[in-house]
Image (cartoon, helix red, strand yellow):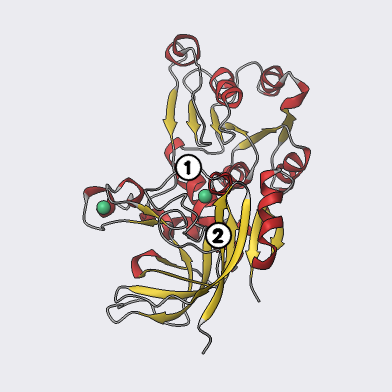
Amino acid sequence: METQMKAVRLPGGQQVEVIDRPIPRPKPNEVLIKVRASAICASDLSLYAGNALVGGANAGTGTITPGHEAAGDVVDIGSAVTYVKPGDRVAVHLSVGCMHCEYCRAGYIQQCPAWQCVGFDVDGGDAEYIVVPEANCLPLPDALSYESGAVLVDNFGTQYHTQKRLGVSGADVTAIIGIGPMGSAAVATAKARGAQVIALDVVEHRLALAGRLGADHVINVADGNALEQIMDLTGGRGPEISIDCSGRPDGENLALDATAKLGKVAFVGECGSVTINPSEQMIRKELDVIGAWVFPISDYYEMVRFLLRHNVTPEQTVSHRYSLDNAPEAFDQVSRRLADKVMFTFN
Ligand SMILES: [Zn+2]
Ligand SMILES: [Zn+2]
């Protein structure tokens, strides 16, 4: 049996290394997974630049394998593993927690005081093998590809939970601002929930993808009159729901300005500081504004049913596929916004 594997390292300064590492061995409660698909997330660009967006002391040191969106085959299990078995197809849940605190018990592992993120704090999926706790193995039905599994553990999972909280439905016009991988997942999810969708971005290939995913209207914000166009499309009322996936101050302000009175807004795209005018934009419009971040692991099974019932294939958002050897080009594509979702695939 082989003992070495390839793994990506991001030492910072937009450097990408592909190194040889020993294949890890599962501890008693862990499983070893042969990775079949591992996606690059916009948040990985923080590691690429050398200042980790999330994580503790290990994150951003360049000593952790990145990749928090992975799927593959279980090939070995630790001595205390009870349910997962070799041969299982699984997607990897990105949050590792204590599994005892009130947040872990409720499925919100990402809120655990001891939270660790796969690909930031512990080795992630941009490698030929990964070990994760048994509790992080999400069974992947045969009808969903490994690539779909990798995309649904972050982008589609986040959108499933966010839109459930917002109650997106066929009664609404929903505006999606920023059509990177999170926004394209938002478009596909909102269409499956029956909403009329307005998709907004400044990049043409992203707007084209939104159209292929069923967006009813696409608006290029670079034209300079996005608010006016949204109002024209909604009879001057504005969308009942807006979801900002851009993480940009102008995108977040557009969401607040455009949304109809008594409407709902979610901020999903991560950002720095932003100046808003709560009186004008929120208070007197009586908006519900939420922050939304990943999803509780307890949503996984219903999300999979939802995707299958509505024939949503998350891999539709993937535009570029690379081998690990070509990791430098893959990260370069993502950082220059030339690609939609970028995936490492394995033979
Ligand atoms: Zn991510
Ligand atoms: Zn916990």
Q: Residues within 10 Å of mark 1 (few under 14, many from 20)?
A: some
What residue sits right under mark 2 in the picture? 9
Position of residue 19 relative to residue 122, above or below, is below
The residue nearer to you, when weighing 98 against 15, is 15
The residue nearer to you, when weighing 9 against 137, is 9
Q: Taking the image as drawn, is residue 144 in sight?
A: no
CA–CA distance in space, label 1 to label 2? 16 Å
Q: Name the residue at 53% across, 21% down.
A: 256
Position of residue 84 relative to residue 13, above or below, is below
User: Picture coordinates of residue 4 (x, y %)?
Assistant: 53, 79
Q: Residues within 10 Å of mark 2 (few under 14, many from 20)?
A: many
What residue sits right under mark 1 in the picture? 53
Q: Name the residue at 43% across, 51% down.
A: 59
Instruction: Give the label on residue 178, or none.
Output: none
Secondary element at image label 1:
loop
Disc 1 within 8 angstroms of ligand 1 (CB): no
Position of residue 10 relative to residue 235, above or below, is below
The residue nearer to you, when weighing 193 against 264, is 264
Question: In the displayed structure, does residue 101 sit left or right of residue 264?
Answer: left
Q: Are marks 1 and 2 in contact (CB under 8 Å)?
A: no
Furthest toward the bottom, the residue is 1
The residue nearer to you, when weighing 85 against 322, is 322
Residue 236 image-quadrant placement: top right
Q: Quadrant of the C terminus?
A: bottom right
Q: Name the residue at 44% across, 26% down.
A: 289
Earlier along the polypeptide chain: callout 1 or callout 2? 2
- Identified by mark 2, the residue type is Arg
User: Picture coordinates of residue 206 (x, y %)?
Assistant: 72, 42
Question: In the displayed structure, does residue 211 sit left or right of residue 302?
Answer: right
Q: Taking the image as drawn, is residue 122 in sight?
A: yes
Secondary element at image label 2:
strand
